[in-house]
Image (tube, helix red, strand yellow):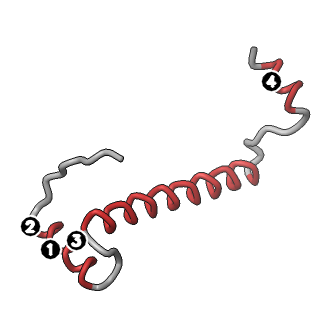
Amino acid sequence: MSTISVPLSPRLEEQLNDLVKSGYGSNKADVVRRALTRVSEDQAVEDVLRASKEITLGLGLSGNLRELAKKFK
């Protein structure tokens, strides 16, 4: 596991401390890890929703994946 140092504005540091106090995480590092995980999960959901919208708009690929792959070689 690596350690990083991130400068925070006083406002962000206060928010971080408040999240620890409220029990969102057991300490500052735990809050940051949980926040990063949440961002990654949110991004994955956005990607799925975007792909779903593209399919609805007819912009998705369909057919045999092997045949489609040959077209991109």
Q: In this view, does 9 lie above or below 7?
A: below
Spatial CA distance of label 1 from label 3 is 5 Å
Number of numbered discs on residues: 4
Residue carrying label 1: 14
Q: In x, y percent, where is residue 49?
A: 63, 58
Disc 4 secondary structure class = helix
| Residue at (11% x, 61% y) in the render | 9
**What amino acid is labelled 1 in the image?**
Glu
Disc 3 vs disc 4: which is toward the camera? 3
**What amino acid is labelled 2 in the image?**
Pro
Q: What number is the disc on residue 58?
A: none
Q: In x, y percent, where is residue 34?
A: 40, 65
Q: Is residue 72 above or below residue 6?
A: above
Crowd class of label 4 (few under 14; some 14 to 19; many from 20; radius 10 Å) = few
**What amino acid is labelled 3 in the image?**
Leu
Side (left or right) of 7 relative to 36: left
Q: Do the residues labelled 1 and 3 touch (CB within 8 Å)?
A: yes
Residue carrying label 4: 69
Q: Are marks 1 and 2 in contact (CB under 8 Å)?
A: yes
Residue carrying label 2: 10
Residue carrying label 3: 16
Q: Do the residues labelled 1 and 4 touch (CB within 8 Å)?
A: no
Spatial CA distance of label 2 from label 4 is 51 Å
Spatial CA distance of label 1 from label 2 is 6 Å
| Residue at (19% x, 75% y) in the render | 17
